[in-house]
Image (cartoon, rainbow, N blue to C red):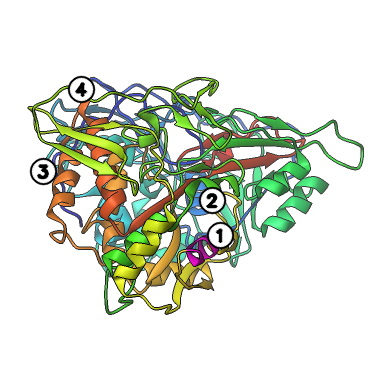
């Protein structure tokens, strides 16, 4: 499990995002958290007497391999398990940057080291068993025992049972992000009696995942009705659910390729499609892009339907997903990707603006933090667009302003100054260190690293590279918010060919590609990353020795300057956080094995039976709230 350091206070409002990941805590961390989920729990809802409703059909490209909530960490897995299990905390459905109570009310201590929870009265699992503290602690201990990304998110936690409804979780250091982390569906509370009876235990001997892939053991609005291989999942309304009854008593989630999703949504054979490409979405609706759109804001609506063509609505929103390249640092895997000069040639040889323009709705990435998260470089100054205008971050309508807007001026300081210069020698950023030791970046236009072919070719020459093929691995069958990875990989290949790098496309099924990446066997990869909670600390996974850094063989201690900036960012609080994370990104842009490319838009198409399809940054689509 990863080592925990002092955690910062999470800013209460981070901006409105869609279909990425969210996390936020109240500014007064000692106060009892507000209740985001106001679902009544006094008595179960009465049995409906309304006429039968056909199942709601959701088309998606599956990326999960299990429905064990503790073992899944994928988009479709999170979407389904969120409907089956409840979590201790929840994200406000109207503003997912806010964290409130879910199954329990909680109090966070002023220093952020402990949380006291009190389970709501009357919570029962789908088999009628009352939920108790024992179920909660078993769920969290099982997550820790299983290891992996979910355990890494939790960190080092200790628990104390007070009574059947009250317990305390504590961390060795400040852990202000824990309430947001616990809202992730991976921490859905399990019926410990059922899970233990089917192989569940604490530690490597656990064998309950097979059972939980075909049976649910939660308290959510739905139960798992059936699973047919990797092709479909059928959910049925939980008869003991005490909250607002879902509009659709049955749900059918199907594993469908994007081309078939388009045909299904147009014909009415699907009610929701999650993976339409920009061109496919334009076929069914005229969808404009609003980077400030919230998770449930409708941006595009199809023309009036004819009797043969059901009405389709398309929502296009900026996601919190980052598309990036990863270069392996292990010489045993590939000597060229491990070469610093070769990595610099890749960084300088890519035209991020052109890549984004080829993927409609996308924005070029300035750094590893997606725009809208505290510390994102795009939010420091107005950004130019390809059309010669710039969009002021935070503007509710994205009002264009002249691209020649005056950049932020460096403040006078006698502290050491580090300049991050572009290939032409023009500073792209200035980092000053204040009296408190926190680096304060003053970022000037352009923030998105520009392409510089001459400098890229010079770096490639210094590396000694002589045209050897470099395999670029990616999951060919898993689009990124509808964008085909092969198209993105081809664009990267073609741009690097102009530098002199021979990229060889190496598509693979998602399971194989992801397994190779996680095991450190990938030399050069095209990947995407969506935060597990909307806080910049989650993106420190790219740092040396952390989750993603380890996957490319980048160990802590190899770059002490990056290590220092990582810890400064992790320990930063309040108003210092944006500067600390911006400084970390500027250094990562120049020296890390990761190359941020673009931040795509997400698209959600819904048919005539759907009045509202509420998106969510963590679980993509709130199935139980579809109306």
Q: Earlier in the sequence, mark 4 or mark 1?
A: 4
Binning the other alpha carbons within 10 Å of mark 3 as few (below 14), some (14 to 19) or many (20 upward) gives some
The answer for how far apart the CA atoms under marks 3 and 4 are is 37 Å
Neighbour tally class for label 1: few under 14, some 14-19, many 20 plus, Cα within 10 Å: some
- Which of marks 2 and 4 precedes in the sequence? 2
Q: Earlier in the sequence, mark 3 or mark 2?
A: 3
- For label 3, the SS is loop
Is 19 one of the magenta-colored residues?
no
Q: Residue at x 41, y 41 (%)?
A: 448
Asked if disc 2 and disc 1 are in contact, CB closer than 8 Å, the reply is: yes
Judging by the rendered image, the residue that carries numbered circle 3 is: 172
Q: Earlier in the sequence, mark 3 or mark 4?
A: 3
Q: Disc 2 marks which residue?
A: 355
Q: Is residue 228 visible?
A: yes
Find numbered disc 2 in the image and state the secondary structure of the residue it sits on: helix
| Image vertical order of residue 229 relative to residue 47, above or below | below
Whether residue 337 can be seen here:
no
Magenta-highlighted residues: 491-498
Q: Which residue is mark 1?
A: 491
Kindly report the distance in space between the C-alpha atoms of the residues bearing marks 1 and 3: 46 Å
Alpha carbon distance from label 4 to label 2:
34 Å
The residue where tag 4 is placed is 411
Compare marks 1 and 3 and give the one earlier in the sequence.
3
> Dot 4: few (<14), some (14–19), or many (≥20) neighbours within 10 Å?
few
- Relative side of 248 to 96, left or right: right
Position in image of residue 250 (x %, y %): 66, 45
- The Cα atoms of the two marked residues, 3 and 2, are separated by 44 Å
**Which part of the image, by quadrant, shows the N terminus?**
bottom left
């Amino acid at each position: 499990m990863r080592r925990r350091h002092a955690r910062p206070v999470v800013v209460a409002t981070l901006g409105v995002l869609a279909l990425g990941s969210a996390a936020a805590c109240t500014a007064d961390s000692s106060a009892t958290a507000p209740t985001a989920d106001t679902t009544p729990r006094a008595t179960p809802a009465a049995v409906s007497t309304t006429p039968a409703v056909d199942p709601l059909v959701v088309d998606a490209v599956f990326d999960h391999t299990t429905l064990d909530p503790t073992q899944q960490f994928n988009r479709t897995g999170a979407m389904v398990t969120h409907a089956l299990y409840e979590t201790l905390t929840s994200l406000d459905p109207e503003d997912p940057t806010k964290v409130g109570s879910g199954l329990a009310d909680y109090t966070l201590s002023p220093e952020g080291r402990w949380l006291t929870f009190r389970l709501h009265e009357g919570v029962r699992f789908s088999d009628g068993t009352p939920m108790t503290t024992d179920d909660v602690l078993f769920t969290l201990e099982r997550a820790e025992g299983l290891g992996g990304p979910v355990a890494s998110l939790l960190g080092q936690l200790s628990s104390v049972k007070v009574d059947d409804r009250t317990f305390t979780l504590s961390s060795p250091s400040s852990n202000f992000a824990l309430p947001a982390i616990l809202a992730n569906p991976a921490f859905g509370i399990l019926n410990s009696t059922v899970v233990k009876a089917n192989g569940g235990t604490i530690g490597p001997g656990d064998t309950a995942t097979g059972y939980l892939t075909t049976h649910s053991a939660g308290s959510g609005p739905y139960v798992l009705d059936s699973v047919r291989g990797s092709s479909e999942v059928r959910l049925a309304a939980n008869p003991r659910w005490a909250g607002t009854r879902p509009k659709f008593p049955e749900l059918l989630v199907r594993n469908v390729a994007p081309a078939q999703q388009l045909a299904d949504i147009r014909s009415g054979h699907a009610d929701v499609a999650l993976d339409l490409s920009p061109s496919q979405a334009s076929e069914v609706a005229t969808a404009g892009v609003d980077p400030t759109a919230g998770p449930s804001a409708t941006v595009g609506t199809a023309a009036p339907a004819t009797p043969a063509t059901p009405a389709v609505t398309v929502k296009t929103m900026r996601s919190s997903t980052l598309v990036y390249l990863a270069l392996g640092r292990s010489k045993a895997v590939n000597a060229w990707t491990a070469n610093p000069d070769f990595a610099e040639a890749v960084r300088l040889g890519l035209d991020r603006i052109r890549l984004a323009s080829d993927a409609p709705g996308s924005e070029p990435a300035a750094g590893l933090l997606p725009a809208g998260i505290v510390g994102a470089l795009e939010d420091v100054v107005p950004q130019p667009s390809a059309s010669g205008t710039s969009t002021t971050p935070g503007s509710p309508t994205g009002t264009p302003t002249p691209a020649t807007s005056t950049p932020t001026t460096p403040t006078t300081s006698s502290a050491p100054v580090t300049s991050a210069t572009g290939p032409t020698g023009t500073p792209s950023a200035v980092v000053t260190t204040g009296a408190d030791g926190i680096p304060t970046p003053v970022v000037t236009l352009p923030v998105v690293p520009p392409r510089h072919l001459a400098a890229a070719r010079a770096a490639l020459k210094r590396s000694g590279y002589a045209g050897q093929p470099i395999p670029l691995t990616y999951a060919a069958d898993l689009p990124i918010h509808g964008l085909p990875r092969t198209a993105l990989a081809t664009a990267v290949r073609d741009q690097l060919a102009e530098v002199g790098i021979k990229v060889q496309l190496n598509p693979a099924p998602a399971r194989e590609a992801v397994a190779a990446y996680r095991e450190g066997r990938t030399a050069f990869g095209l990947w995407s990353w969506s935060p597990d909670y909307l806080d910049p600390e989650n993106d420190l996974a790219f740092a040396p020795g952390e989750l993603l850094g380890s996957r490319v063989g980048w160990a802590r201690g190899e770059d002490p300057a990056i290590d220092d900036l990582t810890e400064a960012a992790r320990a930063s609080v309040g108003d210092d956080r944006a500067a600390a994370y911006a400084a970390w990104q500027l250094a990562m842009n120049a020296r890390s094995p990761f190359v941020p490319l673009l931040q795509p838009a997400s698209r959600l198409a819904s048919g005539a039976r759907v009045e509202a399809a509420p998106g969510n940054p963590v679980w993509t689509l709130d199935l139980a709230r579809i109306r």
